[in-house]
Each structure stands twice: as C-alpha cells, then as structure tokens.
Amino acid sequence: MSQADRKRGNNEPVDTSKTIAFSINGVPCTAYKGESVIQAAQRAGMDIPHFCWHHDLSVPGNCRICMVEVEQDKGDPWFDIGCNMPVTEGMRVLTESDTVKKLRRETMQFITLNHPVDCGICNKAGECILQDYHYEHNGKASMSIDRKNHATKFFPLSDRIMLDNERCIMCTRCVRFTHEVSESHALAAVYRGDHSLIRPAEDANFNDDAYSDNVIDICPVGALLSRENLDHARVWYTKATPSVCPGCSRGCSIDIWHRKPEWALKALDPQLNSRIERVTPHENPAVNGPWICNKARDLATIFERPRATQAMVQGTPVELDEAIARAAGFVQNARRVVALVSSWGSNEELEAFAAAFAPRLGGAVTAYAKADHVPQSGEVVEDHLLIKADKNPNLTAATARFPLAPADLAAALAGADVVLVWGEGVAQASLPAGVTVIRLDGYAQEHNASAHVFIPLSIQTERSGHYTNFEGTVTPFEACFAPKAPVAHAAELFPRLAGTVQLAGAGA
Amino acid sequence: MTAPVTEPVLSGRKFFMNHEVTPTSHTLADYQARGGYQALAKVLKGGVAPADVIKEVSTAGLLGHGGAAFPAGRKWGVIRPDDGEPHYVCMNADEGEPGTFKDRWLLEQVPHMAVEGLILASYAIGGRHAFIYIRGEFDLPFHRIQGAVDEAYAAGLLGKNILGSDYSLDVVVYRGAGSYVCGEASAMLASLEGKKGWPRNRPPRLTVKGLYQKPTVVNNVETLANVPVILSLGAEEFRKTGTPKSPGTQMISISGHVNRPGVYEVEYGYSWEKFIYEDCGGIQGGRGLKCIIPGGVSTKILDADQIKGVTLDHNAAVAAGSQLGSGGMIAIAEGTCMVRLARVIQRFYHHESCGQCTPCREGMGWMERVLDRIVRGEGRPDDIDRLYHISNANDGTTICSLGDSAGYACTAILDHYREEFEYFIKNGRSMMDGQLAVEDPFAGAVPTPLRGMAGAAV
C-alpha cells in the first residue's frame, strides 16, 4: 500500500488483476477489486453526482449526494453512498430510481440551504458543480423561508487565496488536499454544525504551501477563489488551450485559459484579449495527475514579461528578414561557431536545429545545451510531489542531442568567432570580448541591444510543439495566441541561419 | 442453559448498587473486600482462554448499554486475537446523551468494576493497550477512574504480567473536549487519535479498522462493568436476572418531573409504571404523567398510555414504539409545553451536530429555526410538514446513527402532540401556557460543594 493509500485510510487499494461483475441500472459492468461503486461507474462512463469525493483524495462521504440504491433479493432495498460502497459480486445498483432521485433532491435542498446562491457575482459560475447539480437534480426553489446563516466573506486564507465561507458546502476537499497531497496540513475545519468553517490550521502557514492553488480547482463551489485572478473574466468568455508548464522539468500538463476570439474585447485594452486569464491543471496521470504547483499558476509572470518585438543589428532596429540575413552571413562565414541551445525549445525546434546544422556539427559548429533558467531565490527547488530542481522544460531533450554547456563557459567559447545564443540565461559579461554575438530570444532584455544581431523569437504560447520531461514523457502544447509582432519561429529560422533551407524544406 | 424463563423475574437483583456507598466504597480495598477482581483472577490464574471469555459473555447474552443494545459477545467475536495485529478496547465514558448520567454514577462509585471489565475485555480480544475515553466535563468521575487505574497499576492489576500471568495491559485515560458526537464510537476514536471528532463511514466496521486502523472494540462503561459480574456469577446465573432476551440489569438515570430523580438500577423486565410511580415517587405535585423520554432524547417519546403494562426491557420498549436507549429517562408532567420542549431538544442537536455530513449539519439548524419561529409566534401552517420533511430527509442519509436519530425527537413529539403545534402556530402562544406549575423539589436546599475539585479528596 502506497503512502497515499495509507493516508486515505478507508480506501482499499485497487487490484486491477481481479474483476467483479455487477450491474448499474441494469447495465452489466465490471469493477476492479477494491473499487467503490462511484469509481466503477465512472470507468463505465456513468457519472454518479458527487461533491466531496475526489478520485485522488480520501473518501470522507460527507456530502451524501452520491446516495445509490442496491436492490436486494428479498426485503427492502439498501441505500448508501456510492463513494464508500465496495462493489460486490452480482450487486444490482440503481442510480436513477425514484427514491434515489428524491434523496438527491433533498440533499440539494440541504446543501443550498445556507448557500447564498449568488451565482450572478460568483467567479465559479459557469463551471460550478453545485450550479450544475441544482439544475440537474433539484431545479426547485428552497423550501426554507427562514434566514440563511451568515458567515465570513472575503477571508484571506493566504496571499493567494480568498475564502467565502457562505458559499462553502464543507466538502473538506481542500482540507484533505493539504493533508494528503501537499502535506502542508495548512487547513482545518473548525467549529461544529452549520457554523463549521474552513480555517488555516494554527501552526501552519498556507503561504508556504507550494501547491495551495489546487484547492481552488477542486472546490466544487465558489468558496475558494484566486485573489490574483478574481473577477478577471467569466469562464464562458474564456477557453482552455492545453499546454505544458515550462516551469521545471516535470512538464506538467496545464490548461491555459484565455479569452475566446469570438468574445474579444473591442472597447477595452486589446491587450486583454491575449492575456493569460488563469492556468489550471490538465489532468495527466502519466505526469502530474490532477495537480500543478503555484509556479504554474503564475506562468503569466513568465510569459507576459515585456516581449522583444524588434530585430536589431548592433542595437539599431532593422527588418526581421534583414537581421536574419546578417546573422546567416555571420554563421555561414565563421571559422568556428559555438551555439548555446535553449532548453526552452520544443522537441521540434531542437530537431530543426540539429538538422539545420547537421553538416557542420562537430566541425565548424559546436552546440551545447544550456539551462536557460536556474532556481530563483525563494523558489522551491525540489520537493516530494512535482517540483524538480531543473527549471527548464526540455533540458532532457536538449542534452539528448547536444552536450551540456560546461560551467566554465569561457573555455568552451575559446577560439570561437561567432557565438549563437538561443534563449535566456547567458549574460553578456560571460561572453568573451571581440566575438560576434547573435542572440535569439523572445523577451526584451538589456543585453539584446549589445548583440551584433538580435532576432526576436516566438514564445511557447504562440506556437505548438512537444516537450520531453525528465522521465522521457513527451507532452504536447498548443498555441494560444497569434504573435503580436513579426517574430521568427525558431524551427523555421535555423535552416535559414545555417543556409540549409533547401535541405530542410522550410519556407523562407 | 436451563429452560427459558417465561415470566420476568422481578427479584430486584442488583449488580452495581448492591453495597453501601461510603466515602471509600469506590477504592480498590473496598472493592476487593466485596469480591472485586476475583473474576479477573479466576480468568488469568485459572487459565481461562480468551475465546472462553467471549463465549461466556455471548452465552450470558450481554447487550450493549450505550444505546443500541448490540450483543457485546458478538462484537468481540468478530476480532481474531491471533491475526498478528494490535487490538484495542476503548471504554466509552463520553456520556453525552441528554438526560443520561448513569455512567457517571458507575465511574464515581464502582470505577474498579469498569476497569476490571476493561481488562477482561482486552484479554478476550487479545489487546495490549486499552483506552478510557471520558467526557471532558466529568470531573469527579475522571478523578475516580484515573484513581482506579492508578490503584490497579500499583496493585499489579494493570501493567506487565497482570497477577503474575503472561498477560499485560496498559490503560490510558483520555479526557474528551466536550462534544456530544464523540460519544459515537468512530468519532470517539478519531478524537482519541487527536483528530476532529467526526464519525467515520462504514464500511469498514470498527472491529475491522478502528483506532489507528486496527481492530477495535468500543464498549460503554456499563457494558464493561457487567463483564466481571458475568464471569464471577457464570453466564447461566447471570441469565437468571432480567428477561430471556434482555438478561441482566439496566442502570437508569431518571430526571424531569419525578419526585425522586436520580440513578436507579433495575432488572430488565421490571414494570415501567411501578418504576415511575413507586421507585421514583411519582410525578411532582401529584400531576399526571404526560409523556416519557425513555432513553435519552434521541429515543422516541412515549406518552403515558404507551407505557401502561410495559416492562423495562429492550424488546418491550421496541414493541411500545421506542427504545430503552442509553437509559437516560426523562419524565414530563401534564401541562408541559411540547413545542418548547421540542425546541429545547432541537437546539441541543443544532449545537452538537458535528457538521461533517450535509443532512444533519443543515437540517438540525433548519429545524431549530422553524421551531424558533413557531415559539416566537411566527409559525406558518406548513411548518409542521416542513419539520417532518426535514426529519425524513435526514433519516438514513447521515454518516452516523446520531445524525439519523437527531430528527426523530422532534417528529416523535409531533406525532403525539400535533395539536399543540397547530395551536401554537394558529394562536401564536402555547396551548399549555401557565398550566405547568411544579415546584422545584430542591428549592431551599443548600447546594453541596463541588466535589473532586482541586485539593478535595477523591
């Protein structure tokens, strides 16, 4: 039994080698040994409503909405919650019987009793499970004519997360997350009955939890809200583009949410149309499961840094094509070119680089893979869950093709007359004087003007590709926005620099 | 076993209240003088196997005294002493059901019987550690049971190699923090583990995964205190007490409008009316009995007619439409306003609902708000239906049985006294206004100083 299984207490480990035959609503299904009814139903494509149950957390069984009926050979049917009901051989489960529907309706009445139903101003509206279930399973006004309980609104759980206790339905997903996944033990349920509140635990600081923002996603209602993204955009105006977090070599699958083109703002700042509204995990069992760290949430701080939009030759703005032609001239006529290859390039770009320079690699051209980003001060370097010390998305693929740049860069550059710097992480001071420097980068940096030739590149959100994570798992990402200014795509640029356009077949 | 006894034996036999209560009667010396710890000696020195202890308790038909009347022997029998895992016995001394204070008497006056029972139960299921979870508000009972445990350690009745045998047991007395729901076995274990006192879903049962995920038996104080009685008398002799289906005695704590409230030990099968009108001296001020809460407020209320001819045992109480529950009886005199009573009870459930599962967390507060409104004179005609609706939606949908039964109390009162609610809703005042005039039986009495306070002899 794994550490996680042990913590989950009630959960039996699932044994996929043994199957159990049973039926749901008369449809024959198979479950693995140790699976609960809700898990087996979900694999069979039938969703039993649930609030508190989460497939990666323990089973608390407190929301009571997943109540199902089990037909008995003799006697009254048996009702219990599907999330905590082990599947037994020949069990006949009913999820849509009249009694089950009635129980769901009653539970929805209870859950919405003290919920403010302020969907109109709630950030979760549109992707709220409570909202969906209300229409699906209840759809009626509350039976209560009494006042609702009031509780704290706008409670700052941490610098990143705000809690609205009135909307909270006490499913305790967030509490269990901090105990079972992030292990910060930062949240707790305090008080009793309908005065129960989620609160920070006394001896822990939720700010120290590098995974804290996951509780926003797993909150089935709008109780936990991101303070950063609060009121940024209604979810139905935004769409998710699958992507990969470049924050470390784990390469977590993420969804980048941005405004739908058809809902583009015309009156306000057009920059808002290509803004990253938020980042959420894109469930990927092979890499990150359903979680991502807070760095991934803050990808805007990486991708929305000031962009380099202007090609330059010795600090003088020129047309992109002219800059490329000048750079190609330097590269092709050099006696010895040293290229520092970006570990933020996609597999396709690395392949394009290798293919473009293949005829001269090992000869006049020497290529080194380099780490564009190193751990910043205050950043979690490495931990038990997801975060890796290598803060680049594709160093694995880069070092598979090129040797890693030595720590002593000066020695590696000795004798070179052209240095091609692709990406970040190489300060101007570390390059020998007198050498011709060609820089390719997506972001505006002071040293861009010091290079002999500077060519602006597209960034991850403007192109698609694949990254290979530290375990060798390849994950695709897609383009979210079109580039705002004429910038080069690295994969198309390299054949032109190397003069192998015809060989690579890429268009000029 | 002899042929089943058909007539209830009303010998008035007492197991716990069979000695004079003196300032030292709770001590080890006095208990041993009364024959205490001889059952333990018989088992440990006489080489009685653990399975035989379970068999004896099963044969005796000992029922749990915590409220659900689950056969103790069957609960113990689930545990396999030789499965290589640690097993625990927890004594549930978190007596929180309103109206119940019989365990308090046991803990104060015969703590060693409970400790002896705990040792025997642990021996029976192969436990090396046992716990006593005592209600935080209990002060003297805590000092008495802790004192009993300390005395037992000093006398070699606890610790390593008890009475020179191979069996060792350590007992920890743990004080709760004052939560009703921690009287529920799984919530109690969660509290013992240092977690929030929230009940746990079954399956798995506690006898499969209990304290620290190990097989655990949770028994009430009175249940465990019965064990040495059974083992010293023998199962057959024990069964001669009480009725065939409810053998033994029941500690009953009665409060409310009776002339002599207090703790009584009655044999199962004793006449209910005789108990109320003779043992407890009838109703204050010579008034009639309106109704009775048989075993803590979670059990359904019975009116005066329903207890006529009924005996005090589990089967008879169930046949009458309620349960004996935890033995916390509350007598209610004619003239009591049942609407206000329901509200007081509901306030308790609202206050003590643990807040884990939805129906009880939301439903109890809702019911209290509805009843509050009725008592304020703002009731609506559909409020009675609303109360039934909430209680029905709560029934059978909660994690623990306390949540299930939390709505019964109000609806049982509604079943019997619907007209009082209708009157209150229609007229905005109680049907019973000014009719209840019972004098306080303790008026003018000098309050006894709190015993067991720091510095006092306990």
Image: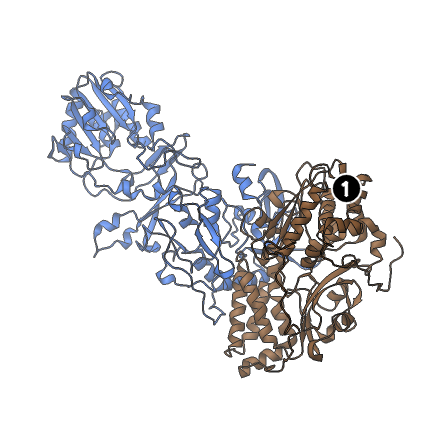
Chain colours: A blue, B brown
Secondary structure at badge 1 equals helix
Whether residue A150 is visible, yes or no, is yes
| Residue A336 x/y as whole percent | 20, 17
The quadrant the C terminus of chain A occupies is top left
Hey, which quadrant is residue A445 in on the image?
top left
> In the orientation shown, which residue stands out farthest toward the bottom?
B427
> In the orientation shown, which residue stands out farthest toward the left?
A316
Q: Is residue B339 above or below residue A36?
A: below
Foreground residue among A24 and B76: B76
> In the orientation shown, which residue stands out farthest toward the right?
B3
Whether residue B67 is visible, yes or no, is no
Label count reads 1
| Residue B289 x/y as whole percent | 70, 76
Q: Residues within 10 Å of mark 1 (few under 14, many from 20)?
A: some
Q: Is residue A148 left or right of residue A17?
A: left
| Residue type, label 1 | Pro
| Residue B61 x/y as whole percent | 79, 54
The quadrant the N terminus of chain A occupies is top right
Q: Which residue is mark 1?
A: B50
Foreground residue among B38 and A282: B38
Which residue is found at the position 25% from the left and 29% from the top? Answer: A505
Q: Is residue A295 left or right of residue A63?
A: left
Please, which chain is the residue tagged with disc 1 on? B
Which residue is found at the position 48% from the left and 58% from the top? Answer: A196
Foreground residue among B70 and A326: B70
Q: Is residue A446 left or right of residue A287?
A: left
